[in-house]
Each structure stands twice: as C-alpha cells, then as structure tokens.
Image: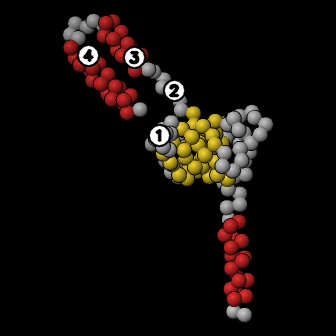
C-alpha cells in the first residue's frame, strides 16, 4: 500500500522532468577547427537567439563536432550555413545561422557545416605590399621609417601565424 502513493507521486514528476526539454532540439556542427568556438556561446538566426553551443568534441580524425541546442521551435533548412561572428567590441563571438533554400529541414541529430571566413589577405600579399612601400618611399633618412615598417611587418606576421 505504501508503494502506491510513491508511485503516484513519481510518475507525474518523471513526466515533468522529461517534458522540460520538449521544445529543445540537438543538432551538430562540424568544422575543421574549434577556433572562435566556446561552450555556452549563443546561436542566432536573423538577429534572434535561438540556441547555444553545448559541447565541443574533438574527433579521432582531428575534426571538431560541436553539439548545438536549439531552444526555439524554428525550421532550419538542410542547406543552412553556420558562421562564427564577432558581436561586440570586446571580441565576443556567436554563431550566426543563415537559412538556405532547401525544402526539407534539419531533424534531431542532423549535422551542419561551419563556414570559415577566408582571410582578407594572404601572407604573401601583405609581404608584397610592404616591399612595394619600401621601394616606393625614398625619404632622405629612410632608416627610421624602415625600422617602423619592419616592426609592423613582424607584428602582422605573428598575428597571421596565430590564425
């Protein structure tokens, strides 16, 4: 007899706990690198937060598969693209979803690809630019200017190597 009240109490509690995530959908994001990805970062579509990045996992083939939790009931087309965007002056990043044109939509457990923005300049382009500036500028005393250009070039090289 004592088991019945406990059972009657635990069944609604179990139902309540399992229905809390009823609107949440898990999709995966595959990328070559975890650069600019951070657990807990927001996922936006059309400027509205629709979810967050829950987990980042490194695969045996060294690709990265991240788990996204989509908390709003939105239809995401299969050809949608996801990109990392800087959203503040302090460098805070978020994932931005650009919906595609496919007629069918992502379901629970499906995977999107992360689109990495291309570098604006290749390393060789920057080096060629500095060489052009050096050859084009012929001040009376070029040493201070050349030292400054060398310093700027070294800083740019170190920044590009970090990316």
Task: Quote the CA–CA distance across marks 1 and 2.
Answer: 20 Å
**Please, what secondary structure does the residue beneath circle 1 have?**
loop
Residue at the spot of label 4: 145
**Vertical order, 132 against 51 (above or below):** above
Q: Are marks 4 and 2 in contact (CB under 8 Å)?
A: no
**Please, what secondary structure does the residue beneath circle 2 have?**
loop
Q: Are marks 1 and 4 in contact (CB under 8 Å)?
A: no
Quarter-wise, where is residue 155 in the image?
A: top left
Residue 95 appears at what percent x and percent y? 57, 42
Task: Quote the CA–CA distance across marks 1 and 3.
Answer: 28 Å
Task: Quote the CA–CA distance across marks 4 and 3.
Answer: 21 Å
Residue at the spot of label 3: 124
**Please, what secondary structure does the residue beneath circle 4 have?**
helix
User: Label 3 crowding class (10 Å Cα cut-off): few <14, some 14-19, many 20+?
Assistant: few
Q: Tell me the residue at 61%/46% (across/down).
A: 28
Residue 132 appears at what percent x and percent y? 36, 9
User: Label 1 crowding class (10 Å Cα cut-off): few <14, some 14-19, many 20+?
Assistant: few
Task: Quote the CA–CA distance across marks 4 and 2.
Answer: 31 Å
Quarter-wise, where is residue 9 in the image?
A: bottom right
Task: Quote the CA–CA distance across marks 3 and 2.
Answer: 15 Å
Residue 154 appears at what percent x and percent y? 30, 24
Residue at the spot of label 1: 62
Which tag is nearer the camera, tag 4 or tag 3? Answer: 3
Residue at the spot of label 2: 118
Horizontal side of residue 75 vs 145, given as left or right? right
């Amino acid at each position: 007899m004592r088991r019945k009240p406990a059972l009657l109490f635990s069944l609604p509690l179990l139902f309540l706990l399992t229905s809390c995530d009823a609107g949440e959908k898990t999709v995966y994001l595959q990328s070559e690198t975890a650069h600019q990805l951070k657990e807990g970062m927001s996922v936006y579509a059309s400027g509205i937060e629709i979810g967050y990045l829950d987990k980042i996992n490194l695969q045996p083939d060294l690709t990265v598969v991240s788990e996204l939790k989509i908390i709003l009931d939105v239809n995401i087309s299969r050809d949608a693209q996801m990109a990392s965007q800087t959203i503040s002056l302090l460098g805070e990043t978020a994932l931005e979803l650009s919906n595609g044109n496919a007629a069918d939509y992502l379901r629970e457990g499906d995977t999107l690809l992360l689109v990495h923005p291309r570098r604006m300049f290749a390393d060789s382009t920057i080096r060629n630019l500095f060489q052009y500036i050096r050859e084009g500028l012929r001040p009376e005393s070029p040493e201070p200017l050349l030292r400054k250009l060398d310093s700027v070039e070294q800083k740019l090289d170190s920044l590009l190597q970090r990316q």
